[in-house]
Amino acid sequence: MTSTAPPDRLIFFDGVCGLCNRFVDRLLRLDHNARFRFAPLQGSTARELLPSGMADALNTVVYLRDGIVLVRSEAALRILIDLGGWRAVYRVFFIVPRFLRDAVYDWISRHRYGWFGKHDACRIPTPEERDRFLP
């Protein structure tokens, strides 16, 4: 990676998880202003920018938002809200205590490979998507 600052909105995801890849695909379609950048948790960008050991925690999405690391339900909700528009209604879920939101998140995370599959290798961006992805 270069010495430039990381993007303001960087989403780290499990590159081999079917659910995670579907989430990224959906975000790419909905993020009309190209605010988000993406990097697999298995990649060099995650090892470089995330706190020690966090890149190895493949059970969560990690959202580096304006230099702040968000994980689990907090990350997922902030990503959806940051898409803008009607998605601001997701703010209502912040009234649910984090331990409950994270319990649901963890339950889905434990079952995601069984429900959505696991790929042999990380997602390869299309030529049109390459500028949105970091290694």
Image (spheres, helix red, strand yellow):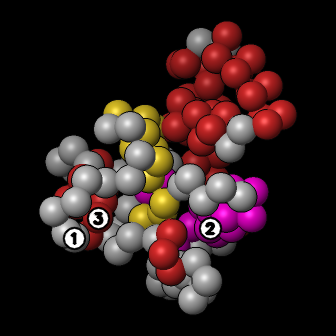
- N-terminal label among 2 and 3: 2
Residue 2 in sight here? yes
Instruction: Tell me which corner region of the image, top left, top right, bottom left or bottom right, holds residue 129.
Output: bottom right
The local crowd at label 2, few if under 14, some if 14 to 19, many if 20 or more residues have their Cα within 10 Å, is many
Distance from disc 1 to disc 3, alpha carbons, whole Å, reads: 7 Å
Quarter in which the N terminus is drawn: bottom left
Q: Is residue 125 above or below residue 59?
A: below
Tell me the residue that label 1 is attached to.
1
The kind of residue tagged 3 is Thr
Local secondary structure at mark 3: helix
Disc 1 residue type? Answer: Met
46 horizontally vs 78: left or right? left
Residue farthest along the right direction in this orientation: 86
Residue range in magenta is 11-31
Q: Which mark is residue 21?
A: 2
**Pointers 1 and 3 in contact (CB under 8 A)?**
yes
Q: Is residue 54 left or right of residue 70?
A: left
Secondary structure, mark 2, is: helix
Give how far across and how far down residue 45 sits, in percent.
29, 64
Marks 1/2 in contact by CB < 8 Å: the verdict is no
Front residue of this view, candidates 65 and 93: 65
Between discs 1 and 2, the one toward the N terminus = 1
Location of the C terminus (image quadrant): bottom left
Q: Nearer the viewer, residue 5 or 76?
A: 5
Confirm whether residue 19 shows in the render. Answer: no
Who's the residue at 35% across and 34% down the image?
Answer: 68
**Dot 1 or dot 3, earlier in sequence:** 1
For label 1, the SS is loop
**Picture coordinates of residue 107, whole percent (x, y):** 62, 40
Name above or below for residue 124 compared with residue 101. below
Residue 134, numbered circle:
none
| Location of residue 70 in the rendering, given as x and y in whole percent from the top left corner | 43, 35
